[in-house]
Amino acid sequence: MDYINKHYSAILQASVLCLGGLLFWFAFVYYPGVVADLKLGKTLPANIVFKPVSATSHTFPIKTETYRIEFDQTANVYYSAIAGRTLPEYVFNRDNAKLALKSALSMDDLCTVDVVYASSEGFEVPQQYRDSRGC
């Protein structure tokens, strides 16, 4: 008991220094790194069947693994080649291409724009999914 009373002050000071150091590390090293990763989207789950695809530029042609969007100035038409071997894959990739085109054109909808959607893999797309207007 005498040993604890003798070194009580030193143990208390060491504990305060240790906890203060941990608080400093958490507040100024760990937490800002986690916030930066969340802003960049690095901590999202990676094992999703259909992954959202985003275009990295707003210049045409817009190319990704699942679609390619080109603009024909003479006809004022956007041509989209969409990948997908099944109808659900095609529709999902087409919706991602629509979103990328809306972002590139800074538009809420594509009602005023002529867009031609076609399968890049020779998949026969039903007429209802080949709409030329984005409405």
Image (tube, rainbow, N blue to C red):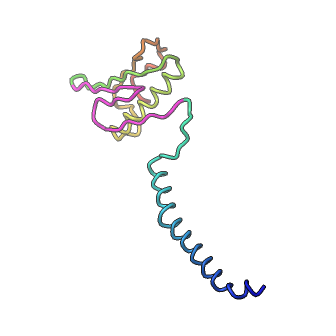
Residues drawn in magenta: 50-73
Residue at 37% in and 33% down: 101
Residue at 65% in and 86% down: 9
Which percent across, then down, holds residue 73?
A: 22, 26
Depth check: give the residue in front, 11 or 51.
11
Picture quarter containing residue 117? top left
Which quarter of the figure is the N terminus placed in? bottom right
When the figure is inspected, residue 16 is found, relative to residue 121, above or below; the finding is below
Q: What residue occupies the far left of the structure in this picture?
A: 74
When the figure is inspected, residue 33 is found, relative to residue 75, above or below; the finding is below
When the figure is inspected, residue 31 is found, relative to residue 107, above or below; the finding is below
Which percent across, then down, holds residue 109?
A: 41, 36
Picture quarter containing residue 107? top left
Q: What residue occupies the far right of the structure in this picture?
A: 1
Q: Is residue 123 left or right of residue 113?
A: right
Q: Is residue 82 left or right of residue 49?
A: left
Q: What residue occupies the far front of the structure in this picture?
A: 3
Residue 84 falls within the magenta-colored stretch = no
Depth check: give the residue in front, 25 or 106.
25
Residue 66 falls within the magenta-colored stretch = yes
Which percent across, then down, holds residue 118?
A: 39, 18
Depth check: give the residue in front, 13 or 19.
13
Which quarter of the figure is the C terminus placed in? top left
Depth check: give the residue in front, 1 or 82.
1
